[in-house]
Amino acid sequence: MKQNFVQEQYVQLAKEQFCQIMKNVPFVSDVEIIRTGLQRGFGEFHAVVHYEDSDETQRFCVDVKSNGEKRFVNLFMLMASQHLDDSCYVFMAPYVSQNSEESIRQKGYSYIDLSGNCYIRSKRIFIHFKGYENKYIEKKAKKNYFGKASGAASAVFRTMLNDPKQIWQVKTLADETGKAIGTVSNVKSFLKDRDWLEESAPGGFRLKHIKEMLYTWAKDYHKKDERKFEFYSLDSVAQIEQKISTWSFKHDKSALLGGFSAAARYAPTVRYQKVEVYVEQQALQEFIVDMNLTPVSSGGNVVITIPHDETPYMFYREINDSLVTSSAQTVLDLLGNAGRGEEAAAAVILREYKEQ
């Protein structure tokens, strides 16, 4: 049965969990729990671990939160980084996600959750358990807005990414995107919980950690099969892309270069042999005929993607007389590409979102 407690109860459970884990270590003789106060600073409690075979002790500084969301983990790591002693700094919560776990481990800290997972690394102790499910109720199951079905949320993300320095209000962002205030507010909460939002008074906010956000978005964005078709053209890649741009300007911008073809206009770093292009469904047949393309099952040099909704076309750019997908869409497409897609995506991110 899942349970939900108040902060004080979580702290007590954390103390019991910590002691139980340490007392299972054969050479640990005792665990001394010390309540923290203003004079001791970090976390809800400290624990001094004594060893049977040595007079040496190890101090663990434990921060307990009732929620293991990324923003709390980031705050824990920020606070821990300000202490340059030999203590082992431990984050504890009812449940720590895989994403948060990876961040904690990469920074050299430890964690324990009340669901049974832990990663403890100190001078003499290394313990790692993972795979246990969350035993504790979250206040509300939070929707994942990164799937392709979440068109309204996608429009909000893209609007913010199109001007990453812009400080938004919920109402102004709702007006700009034409989406409901409630939807924008939910998206704001979604971003805040993952520490991808920088807030400023009064009520303003903008994106931060954009690279991490885009990489996470790409994982969900490519879970569903896309409507892709492969074709062959006798022309070279450069000739095909030039023809596509000329055609698109004459056909209400119904075709946009994407993927590596778009990345070459933003930040040319990777060689590629296939042209990638988005073509609107209603213009597809005319486009194939006008471009003199031959359908193939493999080995083609033109890949056409039919957009699942209007969002891949949002904030398209005109670069060097070519119409290309937005920087955000280009990154999403590249991160879904095998080969050197991630390398090309990193170059676009560095150019478009460097200051963020």
Image (spheres, helix red, strand yellow):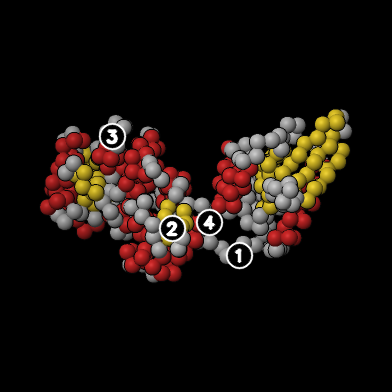
Label 2 or label 1, whichever comes before in sequence order: 1
Which residue in the structure is indicated by mark 1?
A: 139
User: Mark 3 falls on what kind of element?
Assistant: loop
Observer-side mark, 2 or 1, equals 2
Q: Residues within 10 Å of mark 3 (few under 14, many from 20)?
A: some
User: Mark 2 falls on what kind of element?
Assistant: strand
Observer-side mark, 2 or 4, equals 2
User: Mark 4 falls on what kind of element?
Assistant: helix
Label 3 or label 1, whichever comes before in sequence order: 1
Which residue in the structure is indicated by mark 2?
A: 205
Q: Residue at x 38, y 35 (%)?
A: 343
- Tell me the CA gap for discs 3 and 1: 46 Å
- Residue 338 in view in this figure: no
- Residue 160 in view in this figure: yes
- Tell me the CA gap for discs 3 and 4: 35 Å
Residue 344 position, x and y percent, is 35, 36
Which residue is at the front of the view, 292 or 209?
Answer: 209
Picture layout, residue 277 above or below residue 342: below
Picture layout, residue 37 above or below residue 238: below
Whether residues under marks 3 and 1 lie with C-beta atoms below 8 angstroms apart, the answer is: no
Which residue is at the front of the view, 164 or 316?
Answer: 164
Q: Amino acid at mark 1?
A: Lys
Q: Amino acid at mark 3?
A: Pro
Picture layout, residue 323 above or below residue 28: below
Whether residues under marks 2 and 4 lie with C-beta atoms below 8 angstroms apart, the answer is: no
Picture layout, residue 81 above or below residue 201: above
Q: Amino acid at mark 4?
A: Asp
Which numbered tag is attached to residue 268?
3
Horizontal arrangement in the rendering, residue 265 relative to residue 12 (left or right) = left
Q: Residue at x 72, y 51 (%)?
A: 38
Which residue in the structure is indicated by mark 4?
A: 193
